[in-house]
Amino acid sequence: MRLRQLRKEQGLGIKVLAQKLKVDHAYISRIESGQVRPSEQILQKLSKALKHEEAELMILADRIPKEWRSAIRKTPEETAHWIGEWLEGYGEQKQDPSEGKGDSAMASQLANPLKAKRKSPNGAATNQLVFSAHSGTNDELFPRILGLYVAPGSIVADVTYGKGVFWKNVPDGLYQVKATDITQGIDCRSLPYEDGLIDCVVLDPPYMHTPGGTAHVGHQNYEGYYRNNANKNGSGKKYHEAVLDLYFGAADEANRVLRENGIFVVKCADEVCANQQRLTHVELINEFICKGFVVEDLFVLKRNNRPGVSRMLKQVHARKNHSYFLVFRKSNGKSRWFGPKKTNAQPPIPGLHQKTPQKV
Ligand SMILES: C[S@@+](CC[C@H](N)C(=O)[O-])C[C@H]1O[C@@H](n2cnc3c(N)ncnc32)[C@H](O)[C@@H]1O
C-alpha cells in the first residue's frame, strides 16, 4: 500500500516504475498487493526511483535497515526493550475493530507512524505517572520512587532506618527490607552484608549541621543525631564537610554491598552553612559519579508547611522548603537503565511484616 501510494505521488505507472527498476511489472504488482516480499536489492532500487527513505521501505518489508544493523547487534537487549516500549502504544489500536481502516487511513499511518493516534496506550495512565517534583511528605513520595526503580521482592537495605517513616505507605512484604541504624550500633559505613548481594540501598542520614542555639530545631538535627560538631564521627571534619563525609563514606559502603545495577536512593537537602550556599545535591552527585554510580533521577520534595525561622534579622538567602531524593545506579559505565530487573528478588510475600528492623 505504501509503495502504491509513493508511486502515485511520483506520478509513475506500474510499467514505468518496472522499467526503471529493470524488473517485470507483474513483480511490482505482486509487491503492491502484498503477495511477495521485495528483496533488499529491489528495495534499494525502489528507494532511489521513488526518492524515498530506504529505511522505511525496509521496515515495511520486515527487514532491518542495513545502517541500523551493527548498532542493533551491539545492543540487542536495549533495542528490543525500546522497540517494545514504543510499540506498546499501538497494541490496542491493532485490535480495535471499530477503526475499520481503509487503504488511505492505513497508508497515512504507515507513512507517519509517529503521528499515529494513540487511542488507548497500554502504558501507565498519566495520573499514575511518577513526577519529578512532589509537594508533600517523604512517606508519600518514597513508595513511588521504589515502585519505579526497585522490583517487588528485592532486598532493600535501609541503612538509616530511624523510625521507618519512609516505609509507612509501603505494603508489608513487598520488599525484603533490611533495616539498620546507628542507634542499633550499625554504622551505614560498615554494613554487615557481603559484597554485591543487595538490590537497593536507602540512605537518609542527618543532612544538616547544627549551628547551635535554636536554629534548625525540629529539622534533621545533625548534631543531635550524630554529635558531629563534637567531632565524634571519626572523620575529623566539621559542619557541612562532616555532613558530606558521612554521605561519601556511606556511598562507598553502598557501592560494596550493591549488586551491579543495584539502586542507591539518597535523601538530602541543600543548606546554607556559614553564609555559604552549599548545594549538597550537586556535591553528592559529583562525588558519587566518581565512585562508580550513575545518576538516574532527581526528585524534589516540597514541604507543605512553612519552615520555621528563628532569629533571622535580615534574610540573605532563600529559605529552603524543599529537599531531594536522588536515585543512583551502580554501573560499570556500559549499561543503561531500562527499569528494574528482579535479580535478587523473591516473590513478594503479602502480609509478611518485614519492616521492623531485622537483626542482621
Ligand atoms: C533523618 S533520620 C532518618 C529517618 C528515616 N529515613 C525515617 O524514615 O524515619 C537520620 C537517621 O540516621 C541515623 N544515623 C546517623 N548517623 C548514622 C550512621 N553513621 N550510620 C547509620 N545511621 C546513622 C540516625 O540515627 C537517624 O535515625
Image: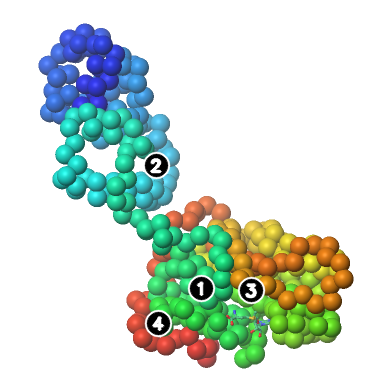
Residue 318: image quadrant is bottom right
| Tag 2 residue | 72
Q: Residues within 10 Å of mark 3 (few under 14, many from 20)?
A: few
| Tag 1 residue | 140
Quadrant of ligand 1: it is bottom right
Horizontal placement of 194 versus 47: left or right?
A: right
| Tag 4 residue | 173
**Alpha-carbon span between mark 1 and mark 2:** 39 Å
Which residue is rendered at x = 51% and y = 73% of the image? 140
Does the image show residue 188? Answer: yes
Query: What kind of residue is marked 1?
Result: Glu
In front: label 4 or label 3: 3
* 339 w.r.t. 257: above or below: above
Which residue is rendered at x = 48% and y = 72% of the image? 143
Query: What kind of residue is marked 2?
Result: Ile
Lower position in the chain sequence, tag 2 or tag 3: 2
